[in-house]
Image: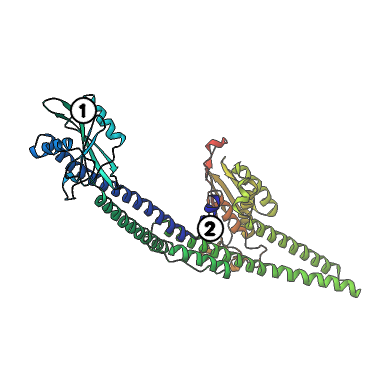
Amino acid sequence: MTRLARRFRALPIRSRLSLLVAAAVAFAVAAVSVTCWFIVQGKLYEQIDKDLQKSATAMLMGRPQDLDNIRTALNNCTQTPQGASNGNWNTYAQVVTSDGTLCLFPSSVGRIKVTQTDENVVKNADNGNADTRKGVFHNSTDTDGNRVRVLTTPITISSPVSQTNAVLMAAVHLKGTETTLKDLALVLLLVSGIGVVGAGAAGLAVARAGLRPVDKLTEAVEHVARTEDLTIRIPVADDGEDEIARLSRSFNSMTSALASSRELQQQLIADAGHELRTPLTSLRTNVELLTRSEETGRPLPPADRKALLASVKAQMTELASLIGDLQELSRSEGQRGERVQVIAFHDTVATALRRARLRGPELTITADLAPWYVRAEPSALERAIVNVLDNAVKFSPDGGTVDVALDRGVLTVRDHGPGIAVEELPHVFDRFWRSPSARALPGSGLGLSIVARTVQQSGGEVSLAPAEGGGTVATVRLPGAPTAPPELVQVP
């Protein structure tokens, strides 16, 4: 059985569906056919029994010719058939007395074998327990082995000198009935076979039609695996709501997401390569100058050497910052899930402000921070706030002011720099994008992109807008609560 089950599971789905449909139809047809055969058999036997009962009852009620037949059979008792088959009820007719004597009717065409059932009826008749209006139906055979349907009815035969208890056995051939039942069984078997074969063929056709979308999906998956072409799409009807349509839509969504991810990855690699090329080229040039100076024995002037070393240090710092930013952007959502916790947003902003004041000592940075607790990754959120403040410090003029405020989860950072052009606002959070006026300044173009990603992962939102009177206002909104207990923090 286990081996058969393994072989069945190894078949294609359409073959399994066809076999299951054929098996289900075969079971249903077999059940209907057997039920139909037994019902017809019961009806045929019921009709035979009615005819036997009707004839025997009429005889026992005292029709003269029938009573004469009974007396004749007893007076001229013989066990040799003398009659000929004429289709009447008395084709087989005999009387069996309580002492076991068997006498055939003159018109009987054969002798019925007396069975235990008949002997029991004789005994009951001899004991006076028999009802002359009832009898016992059963199947038996004649002396030639032909199957017959028998009605055994107890009777009492009275004469002037004695009273005899006996049974009247009347029977008819079952040959016609059995032939009818055999023909019916053959027809039912033939119809069942045709039905099973047709059901198997229909099941195969239905399986092919139903699995056609699955075949298309399989071909699409194989095509993607073979060619890595993520532009392939499976056509889906707009009103399709079945499992296959949902699976096709999910596959199309998956390939679209993969194609978008690959495009972003390729763009990230291209942009990273472009951004790395400039500092690496400058760094190589400076190192070559220093190396050539050492090899030729002509040292550079101290001022030039100091400037070159400062440039090398700045470029290495820029490369380290760019690599750190790339690592931050490459982190998946699952890598940050375990480090998320409830933190004091105002403390994070305060820490970032200390770093910003060190980077812009010539600036005046004001702060008004109200308590606010959020659910986020501490280091990532601090890095994002530092990037927002660095952006304000970078574009603020010497001696300028940066205003920082935190009120009910809304952090605003306003600088008084040149501001951002309206047409540039849609691109400020794109990776490696830098405004034309900022390309001469240090930076990788990834700071605001990291800010946007971190804030969104924490369930908040960030935006940049021109400020009244000049400058830029950066706004960061994070869900949370003004008190520390974690249960009061709104989980994003």
Q: Which is nearer the eye, 280 or 84?
A: 84
Q: Which residue is at 56% across, 35% downward?
A: 485
Q: Amino acid at mark 2?
A: Ala
Where is mark 1, residue-wise?
A: 130
x, y percent for residue 100: 26, 32
Q: Is residue 392 visible?
A: yes
Examine the image and state in which quarter residue 306 appears: bottom right
What distance separates the C-alpha of mark 2 from that of mark 1? 67 Å
Where is mark 2, residue-wise?
A: 10
Element carrying mark 2: helix
User: In the shown orientation, is residue 303 left or right of residue 464?
Assistant: right
**Label 2 close to label 1 by CB (< 8 Å):** no
x, y percent for residue 450: 61, 56
x, y percent for residue 428: 56, 62
Examine the image and state in which quarter residue 151 appears: top left
Q: Which residue is at 58% across, 69% downward?
A: 226
In the current view of this chain or complex, which residue is farthest to the bottom?
A: 296
**Disc assigned to residue 261:** none
